[in-house]
Each structure stands twice: as structure tokens, then as C-alpha cells.
Amino acid sequence: MPVVMTVKELERFLLAEFPQVFHPDSGLAIEAVWERGCRVRQAFQQFSVRPGGTISGPTMMALADFAMYVAVLAAIGPVPLAVTINLNINFLRKPAPADLVAEARLLKLGKRLATGEVTICSDGAMEPVAHVTSTYSIPPDGNGIMEPQE
């Protein structure tokens, strides 16, 4: 299954549909998309550091969810109401105070559900800091906008 949306198309879509999450100051970047996968980055931001000097769990969860959403959209096109229905994260080690890089891979892409995994690493490190599995619900009409009933 070929990529349906390019990096530039995804960026335009996310800027228009989700400016509260994807905006110039968010630190989020889409680096690459490929068949059933993507690589995204969260720039290091001091406010994401929790006590103990590590990047917070919510920051890593948000990055994983963003990576899965990008992978799903790259595969199915601009579907604003595709939503997370499950996200499970295993924190494996303390991330360095550096950018986080997440690679998502869709394991199964059906008409109504997409299941995948995300590996998050500190920039430049080989060992993952977190491993995530996630499932997205894809609306039946392809865009998630309900048609008026007559």
C-alpha cells in the first residue's frame, strides 16, 4: 500500500486541523513517511523535564500518539476523526535531555482499525527509551463527519 499523504501534505493538514498541537512552537516535526510508517521528532523543551531530570511520560505518550496519527494518515489520507482507542506504553530507560525521535510502524491496517507500534529513542541513541502499541479507530465514512439524517 503506497503512501497517500506526503510530509508536506501532512504538515498542511495538521496545521489546519490541529493547530493546538502542531504549530511552529510545538517542537514537533515530521521527518519522513513511508509505506505503513513514519519518523517524527519532538524537540527538547525544558518544560518537558520532570523531577529527576528526565523527560516526562506525558511528553513521550503525546509523541507516540502523534507518530501513530501521522502513520495512519499517511496510509489512509486526511481523516480528521480517526482517533486513538488504545495506547499502551512501556518506559524502558531514562531519556537523555535531548530531542526524542519516534518511529511508527503499522502492523495491521483494516477498514475500521489500524494497529501499530512506536519506538521512541533519544536523538543519537540506539537503545529505545519507550515502546508503544496503539490502535486507532477509522470512521466508517472515511472522514468521520456525520451526514445529516433525513
Image: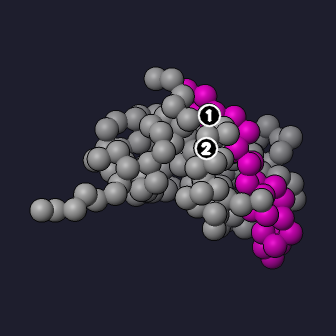
- Contact? badges 2 and 1 (CB < 8 Å): yes
Cα gap from disc 2 to disc 1, whole angstroms: 6 Å
**Residue 71 against residue 80 in the figure, above or below:** above
What residue sits 61% from the left and 44% below the top? 10
What residue sits 25% from the left and 57% below the top? 147
Q: What element carries label 2?
A: helix
Is 75 placed left or right of 30 in the picture? left
Characterize the local packing of mark 2: few (<14), some (14-19) or many (20 or more) Cα atoms within 10 angstroms: many
**Residue 121 against residue 36 in the figure, above or below:** below
State the image coordinates of residue 15 (x, y, percent, origin top left).
Answer: 64, 56
Is 140 placed left or right of 45 in the picture? left
Magenta segment includes 38: yes
Q: What are the residue bounds of the magenta stretch?
A: 25-53
Asked if residue 53 can be seen in this view, the reply is no
Residue farthest along the bottom direction in this orientation: 51
Q: Which mark is residue 6?
A: 1
Magenta segment includes 42: yes
Q: Which of 146 and 92 is in front in this view?
A: 146
Q: Is mark 1 on a helix, strand or loop?
A: loop
Is 139 placed left or right of 117 in the picture? left
State the image coordinates of residue 107 (x, y, percent, origin top left).
Answer: 46, 34
Q: Residue 10 carries which label?
A: 2
Type of amino acid under label 2? Leu
Q: Residue 54 carries which label?
A: none
State the image coordinates of residue 149 (x, y, percent, origin top left).
Answer: 16, 62
Q: In which quarter of the image is residue 61?
A: bottom right
Type of amino acid under label 1? Thr
